[in-house]
């Protein structure tokens, strides 16, 4: 299932992007962590929506 593979690949890329950010100790690590995670989740959600729309159009 190509859509799922693509989604997995992109979520792994996202994890790599978030990981180093989490490693940096900022003044308020919890807060920036939460912001980063929220941004990552929002990005994932829009990717999922996009993929679902593409899959819907193909079938």
Image (tube, grey):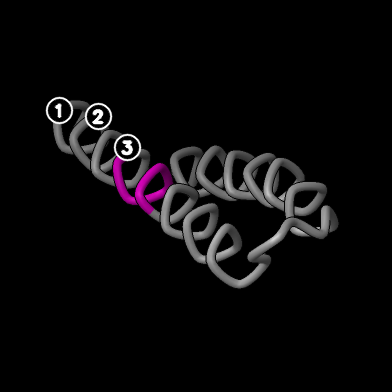
Given residues 36 and 55, the one toward you in this image is 36
Q: Which residue is mark 2?
A: 54
Assess disc 3: are there few (<14), some (14-19) or many (≥20) residues with their C-alpha within 10 Å of its C-alpha: some
14 relative to 24, above or below:
above
User: Could you say which disc has been placed on residue 46 in the image?
Assistant: none
Distance Cα–Cα, label 3 vs label 2: 5 Å
At 76% across and 45% down in the image, what residue appears?
A: 16
Boundaries of the magenta span: 42-46
Pointer 3 or 1: first along the chain: 3
41 relative to 52, above or below:
below
At 22% across and 27% down in the image, what residue appears?
A: 58
Q: Residue 54 colored magenta?
A: no
Is 2 displayed left or right of 58 in the figure? right
Residue 12 place in picture, x, y as percent: 69, 48
Q: Which residue is mark 3?
A: 51
Q: Residue 45 colored magenta?
A: yes
Given residues 10 and 43, the one toward you in this image is 43
Quadrant containing the C terminus is top left
Q: Which residue is mark 1?
A: 57
Assess disc 1: are there few (<14), some (14-19) or many (≥20) residues with their C-alpha within 10 Å of its C-alpha: few
Distance Cα–Cα, label 3 vs label 1: 10 Å
User: Mark 2 touching mark 1, by CB under 8 A?
Assistant: yes
């Amino acid at each position: 299932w190509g859509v799922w593979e693509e989604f997995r690949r992109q979520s792994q890329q996202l994890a790599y992007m978030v990981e180093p950010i989490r490693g940096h100790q900022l003044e308020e690590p919890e807060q920036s962590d939460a912001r980063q995670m929220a941004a990552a989740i929002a990005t994932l959600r829009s990717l999922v929506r996009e993929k679902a729309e593409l899959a819907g159009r193909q079938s």
